[in-house]
Image (spheres, helix red, strand yellow):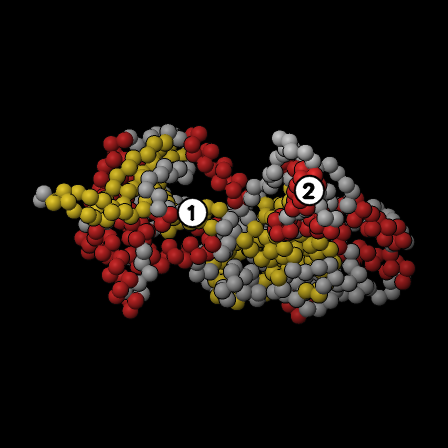
Amino acid sequence: MPDYNLDREVKPMAVAVIMPRQGNTVESCIITEWKKKVGDTVAVGDILFAYETDKAAFECEAETAGTLLKVLYEEGDDVPVLENVCVIGNPGENPDDALNGAAAAPAAAGTAPAAAAAAAPAAAAGDCHPVIMPRQGNTVESCVITEFFKSVGDQVNVGDKLFAYETDKAAFECEAEFAGTLLAVFYNEGDDVPCLDNVCVIGAPGANPEVFRPGAEVPAAAPVAAAAPAAEAAPAAELAEAPVVVGDLKISPRAKKLAEDKKADLSKVVPTGPDGRVIERDVQKLIDEGKLLGATAAAATAAVAAAPVELGVPCDDSYTEPMSNIRKVIARSMVASLSTMAQLTHNISYDATEVKAARALYKAKGEPFGMDKISINDIIMYVVARTLTQPEHRALNANLIDDGKTMKYFRGVNLGMAVDTDRGLMVPTIFNADKMTLKQLSDTAKKLAKECKEGKISPDYLQGASFTVSNIGSLGIESFTPVVNPPQTGILGVCAMKDAFRMNNGQIEVYPSMNLSLSYDHRALDGTPASKFLRDLKINLENFNLMLAKG
């Protein structure tokens, strides 16, 4: 009888750790520091080494427990992505077996066939490699699976995309670090998976992946014949119908999109996903049964038309859907900002003649110098960064921390830039903006905005700002109250450019004017220092050519 006793030690064969790919355009990474040395014991989640691309720094966490048997590259080496970096296994194993793709060692000679067969299931677990949910940033606790690219039974090669997932800030794809067959998937699309939890298992056909199922308990002994019905019982439990509260509906992104496209009536849905989540097949069932919003409305309309004219049937033609992760984060941040700060806003306008003329010059003649894409907002951010470096304005280039007990002042200006994306508002940081040329700042701003909109921005660039600029002038807004992003102490709102009028030597003169709205934390500074910052910013913008020459 097969022995499923998991109390005995399961010894997986040595596993090679590859250099992760951090972005589709990254071809290699530099190892900056080894956190483990050969012979050290490694647990799942331990940091093996630190590495960096040309844009950001990362840490590689162990997905397999064991001993570090071999290191193939040293600190400072530039390692191609998906290249083997080190090997983890059991003491005494040959690490070259993992590098050469060798199979596990055969059973010792003289072992009885019956004993070998009894040990097969436990040994088979050694042919499995669990794939964990990566941790994308030190503050990320879980990620949502948005799409699986492989199904159970599919062949997997190193570098194949297994699944797509997202945090509340960016989207990523998980690539296979092991070759084999996809034996099991423990989560569905739309599930919120804790970081470092096993998501799926890759291994040799016939191996037992269930030992890696999160929270699973395998019986100490069970006949093979009983294993198949137990495996078949899981879908039955998953399909059990449960009452649905539409106002608190959990739904996967793919199911949500299908429901919106086909106008499925989610008030009639029966969730079959884990923890009462609505998944794609649930929505497809509604569509197949004709339970659509349009069909319901048409039936109601026909019934009303056939009846005598009355006041009509009271109805609530609405629907609910859960907020996305990024909207929840924005909501928490904005509520925290307005409930913990003493915020107020000052407004001022400035003569944008020089700024407008500079932009026209760059557009007309800047292409040979790579400056034709410099925008009005780039110019404003350039001047804001320089103005914040004036010592009298240090309270606005700061963070108020420790529940309002400590001011953290920045020697340089890390300028936050509000970016509107399909997923919600994101604020990437232009680090050391005060030390950049206008062209450097413009190029950096456009690159960060592009990565935000594509969902590829590194979490490292969504933190650390000392002050933020939010520009909605392109929408024609003439004045607004931007909300301070804690723990920052200020944010500048940039409004639309419009024609204004003034008297000049007894004559009415038309000039381009822009309004600026400064919201600030009154705990960190008073109204007079805030007003002086707006005054100096106005002077610097109206004399932009001199500011640019000063550098």
Q: CA distance from mark 1 to mark 2?
A: 50 Å
- Residue at the image position 31 percent from the left and 38 percent from the top: 518
- Residue at the image position 86 percent from the left and 50 percent from the top: 229
Res 490 quadrant in image: top left
- Residue at the image position 9 percent from the left and 44 percent from the top: 505
* Residue 547 spot, x, y in % from top left: 21, 51
- Residue at the image position 49 percent from the left and 64 percent from the top: 25
Residue bearing mark 2 = 302
Label 1 Cα crowd, 10 Å radius (few <14 / some 14-19 / many 20+)? many
Residue 190 is at least partly visible in this image: no
Which secondary structure lies at badge 1? loop
* Residue 137 spot, x, y in % from top left: 52, 49
Residue 473 is at least partly visible in this image: yes
Toward the viewer: 308 or 400?
308
Please, which residue is most extreme toward the left here? 505
Toward the viewer: 461 or 80?
461
The quarter of the rendered structure image containing the N terminus is bottom right
Q: Point out which mark residue 427 bears.
A: 1
> With 145 as the anchor, is 514 left or right in this view?
left
Toward the viewer: 454 or 34?
454
The kind of residue on which mark 2 rests is Ala
